[in-house]
Image (cartoon, coloured by chain):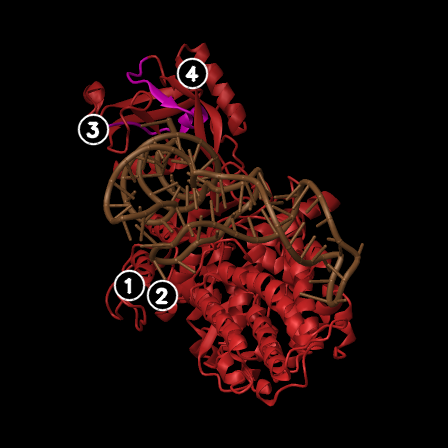
Amino acid sequence: MAKEVDPKFTKPYDPAGTEGRIYEAWEKSGYFNPDNLPGERTEPFSVVLPPVNVTGVLHLGHAYEDSLQDAVIRYARMRGKRALFVPGTDSAAIATQARVEKNIQKEEGKSRHDLGREELVRRITAFAKESESTILNQIRRMGASLDWSRYAYALDKARSRAVTEAFTRMYKAGLIYRGYRIVNWDPKGQTTISDDEIVYEERPGKLYTFKYSKDFPISIATTRPETKAGDVAVAVHPEDPRYQPFLGKEYDTVFCDVPVHLKIVADAAVDPSFGTGAVGVTPAHSQIDWEIARRHALPTDNVVINEYAKMKVEGRLNGLKAAEARAAVVDWLQSQGLLEKEEDVLQNIATAERTGAVIEPLPKMQWWVDVEKPFTLAHSSIPGIPAGAPITLKQLMRKAVESGAVAMPQEGFRNAYFHWIDNLRDWCISRQIWFGHRIPVWYRGEEIRVGEAPEDSATWLQDPDVLDTWFSSALWTFSTLGWPDHTLDLGTYHPTAFMSPGYEILTLWVSRMILMAGFHLGQVPFKTVLIHGLVRDKSGRKFSKSQGNGIDPLEMIDKYGADALRMGLLVGTAVGNDIKFDEQKVKGYKHFANKLWNIARFILESAPDLPAAASRESAPGRSAKSYYPSTLLPVDQELADELDSLLADVTKDLEESRFYLAAEKLYHYAWHRLADEILEESKQILGTKVAPSSAPEAGKASRQAFLLYALDALVKALHPFMPFLTEEIYQSLPTKNAEFLMISHWPV
RNA sequence: GCGCUCUUAGCUCAGUUGGUAGAGCAUACCCUUCACACGGGUAGGGUCACAGGUUCGAGUCCUGUAGAGCGCACCA
């Protein structure tokens, strides 16, 4: 009685032999591009892939992000929407340049200055190009249904134009300005970085208490004695009784060969309980001191440390590295009998995220985005931000989320976001590196031009700096859709529907996309943002090259298949929490893939010739009842109802972003309900090779009809999670009536 | 210092609006039976961190405590 089925089902499911073939067929079909999707699709649904750095290879974090967003896109596509998933890569300016520079230094012993700007940029571009194709193919292997015809790269022509335009508009609105201010200087990377690119590290240090000279009346405490050569004042709390007599007095002394002039000032920023309650004010090498100096009209240009973190002063300290200078100053203090105390303390050291170097605050002329300056929007679709009413970028970023225009369903992340905004200062956007979007500003004497290159460009000098890589990334949701042109894509797909970035870039990227989309379009960049966690190793450590605990997603795919990897990453992990990656889990879902494969085999083997009704495409809103109105017996009708209610449940989970639950429920039903119970019971009804059934024909037909329906529905509902396997089964289903499962209708 | 997240079976984690605790892996025993040994069956294993409270009823809500992780600020 067993029917002959496709012989492929007689062997275990073979992901390696299936996935590549299927992805190629999908890609060739053109259905990744919503313009080609069949049927009437009016509702757009777009997701822009967080651009992947061209330096890298695919890691599990990408794999997770791809799985999550691809599941969302595939679900939307099956719901009949114009589903667009836009692929892209980022130049990751500092990271990429640092990496190539390191290679060149190692292999050729040359620095970037030996090569020159043009040659270095040429080399980095070549490296990026090579890296790009590697990573794009890796993303394909995850099964991500990206529309490759809309591929964008951060440094391509269209994106460069968007960057220039964005910069120009913000400059004209007075939101971008050039200013001489204290910045976070990375002595290793030789560039400024923004506050958000700083990583604080706790390190043991020493707190020294001393006097500048024998005659100086006040002792001060510092962890950086070497900077004291640059002091211009001593600040105390205005109400500190100990120092009232000295307020306003000025002193001249020579500190370790360096003449210093010190004024005693009162400033509320000083904590009277810390150290001696008196602060040596070093405006050129401390953010806080800079601000104190500004408040008291003290000189701010007393630079004693240069860009290489070396001393630049008169006398014995000159040319010493900061650490050496510190020792020298301490020696000198001791020899003069000025050192009063030396205590061990734990301090938070600011280091550069990319290079790990200790940040040296320095005053520099840089470009900034003003987050406090009011401006008005010509158009706005963001609730609470009317066009024409003055607003600041800070307020805009807050309102967009507060009003729900950007739905950020996780309360914890919403709070973190608001907290960040409250502490936000102007954003330093210029970087002293060569790879990236060069600042679109030209100088000729006192003249300044912003925007496209002037025609007589030979007489102008372009600003040598490039923009923070996050500046162009911040435009990504709309620069990928054709902005600044008013393209059809931009009108159709922006704001995008959904995005799921990691929490580590909530402030670096998510917030700035909201800023840019708000300013340039009066829109939000996405309607829903679901922040996800970090993929860690089994014991909770971050994956890192130096620790050697990296896991290559491609190796997992080779071993278990992309479907299994996707399930292993998605199931049982609440979005937002960190994921401890467990290979055993992936292995488990490989077994599940095979289980489903065999469920399909069983049902197809025992399937009759297809009842006419079953071949109908499942129009939205149709339940199993409407498929087989005359053939289902009550017992099977009950099974169908049970399945339908599960499908409704799963659909609700997907609508509310509980992917991990939806997938798990389907898994559980398929294995422990359908296979373990219903199929076993069905053997009695349908008969087996050795034990023919004695059940009446009507009972058989009814059960067969249900089983076909169940298989059809399961394969569809699992498709967002396990796209390859389900597509491969679908291609053999008698109920198949679309070219691909990918474009068939969701079973509810 | 301010804030966030987590604490559920040996391990990794689910548990959506409160209704008698779940999965995978691991463990023990049995079964190569006819969709699948990438399988089937059976079993053991949890006072849901702790202490209060709200409720007819709390893993789920509230308050507090402890531990772990993270973010922000301070860091003279």
Query: Callout 3: helix, strand or loop?
Result: loop
Query: Callout 1: helix, strand or loop?
Result: loop
Q: Is residue A227 magenta?
A: yes
Q: Are marks 3 and 1 in contact (CB under 8 Å)?
A: no
**Chain in brown (letter):** B
Chain-order first, disc 4 or disc 1:
4
Badge 1 crowding class, 10 Å Cα cut-off, few under 14, some 14 to 19, many 20 or more, is: some
Q: Are marks 2 and 1 on the same chain?
A: yes
Chain-order first, disc 3 or disc 2:
3
Q: Position of residue A147 (x, y in %)?
A: 58, 73
Q: Are marks 2 and 4 in contact (CB under 8 Å)?
A: no
What's the CA distance linking mark 2 and mark 1?
9 Å
Which residue bears the numbered disc 2?
Answer: A519
* Residue in view at x 58 percent, y 70 percent: A719
Query: Callout 4: helix, strand or loop?
Result: strand
Q: Position of residue A208 (x, y in %)?
A: 41, 19
What's the CA distance linking mark 3 and mark 1?
37 Å
Which residue bears the numbered disc 4?
Answer: A342
Q: Are marks 4 and 3 on the same chain?
A: yes
Q: Kindly identify which numbered label has been placed on residue A238.
A: 3
Which residue bears the numbered disc 1?
Answer: A375
Q: Which residues are the magenta region?
A: A215-238
Q: Position of residue A13 (x, y in %)?
A: 73, 65
Question: What amino acid does circle 2 point to?
Answer: Phe
Question: What amino acid does circle 3 point to?
Answer: Pro
Q: Are marks 3 and 2 on the same chain?
A: yes
Q: Are marks 2 and 1 in contact (CB under 8 Å)?
A: yes
Q: Does any portion of residue A431 appear in the rendered image?
A: no
